[in-house]
């Protein structure tokens, strides 16, 4: 599998390009901004984009999705529980003091059980509400690879003080859906450095016994 992860936009969202070496099919996860950069990475590997997956509808993760769709024709997947956040993009932009990007409803729902991935590399969609109500993670079992969006970070978890956030819910999602994965699973979070499930289970201060969030 070809994988490139790089920060985009003013909040440095981790955008990931995944590609198959044989079919040259690709998917992009969280194209929040800098679409010319994303297109150049696809071109560098000779990849054809087949799918755009957005882990949640915060502006820094979804802001460039429609532009990337228009450039490539690839459909957008987003969990329908985040449609209310998509509809308040003007307000999200105002929080950051930036111009609101043009957005549109997704072509397909990124719900549990939906088809995600590319030829030879199927992804399991894990619904992990808490950071937002429609937050998802993507798990590629053969590669032991988890694209965690803003649910789990190296040494931290997603914030829950924005619309749709729920502290108890995000902890439940992480414990029930993510910490059950193999310890050597590589975690690519929505921001910041990579980590592993084992490292977060052992040392993440938010995931230790007795921790409760309101």
Image (cartoon, rainbow, N blue to C red):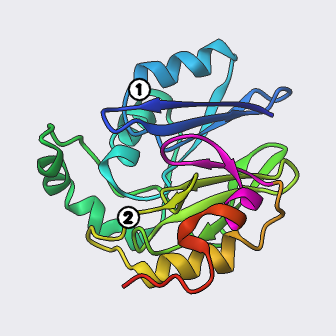
Marks 1 and 2, how far apart in space? 26 Å
- In the visual, does 110 lie left or right of 93? right
Q: Residue at x 17, y 45 (%)?
A: 96
Q: In this view, does 45 lie above or below 19?
A: above
Q: Which span of residues is magenta-colored?
A: 185-201
Is residue 193 within the magenta segment? yes
Is residue 148 within the magenta segment? no
Q: Is residue 51 above or below residue 105?
A: above
Q: Name the residue under label 1.
A: 35
Q: From the image, which quarter does the N terminus lie in?
A: top right
Q: Where is residue 84 in the image (x, y as percent from the top left)?
A: 28, 69
Q: Residue at x 83, y 54 (%)?
A: 184
Q: Residue at x 33, y 42 (%)?
A: 63
Q: Where is residue 155 in the image (x, y as percent from the top left)?
A: 56, 56
The answer to whether residue 110 shows anywhere in this view is no
Say which label, 1 or 2, has the lower sequence index.
Answer: 1
Q: In this view, does 31 lie above or below 115?
A: above
Q: Name the residue under label 2.
A: 159
């Amino acid at each position: 599998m070809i994988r490139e992860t790089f920060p985009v936009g003013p909040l440095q969202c981790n955008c990931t390009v995944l590609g198959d070496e044989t079919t040259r099919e690709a998917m992009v996860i969280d194209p929040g901004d800098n679409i010319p950069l994303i297109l150049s990475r696809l071109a560098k590997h000779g990849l054809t984009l087949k799918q755009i997956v957005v882990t949640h509808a915060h502006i820094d993760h979804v802001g460039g999705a429609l532009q990337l769709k228009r450039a490539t024709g690839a459909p957008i997947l987003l969990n329908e529980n985040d449609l209310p956040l998509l509809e308040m993009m003007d307000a999200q932009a105002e929080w950051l003091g930036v111009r609101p990007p043009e957005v549109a409803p997704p072509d397909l729902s990124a719900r549990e059980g939906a088809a995600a991935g590319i030829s030879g590399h199927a992804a399991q969609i894990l619904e992990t509400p808490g950071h937002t109500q429609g937050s998802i993670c993507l798990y590629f079992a053969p590669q032991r690879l988890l694209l965690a969006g803003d649910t789990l970070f190296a040494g931290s978890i997603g914030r829950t003080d924005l619309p749709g956030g729920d502290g108890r819910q995000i902890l439940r999602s992480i414990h029930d859906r993510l910490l059950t994965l193999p310890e050597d699973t590589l975690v690519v979070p929505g921001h910041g450095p990579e980590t592993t499930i084992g490292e977060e289970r052992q040392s993440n201060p938010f995931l230790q016994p007795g921790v409760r969030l309101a």
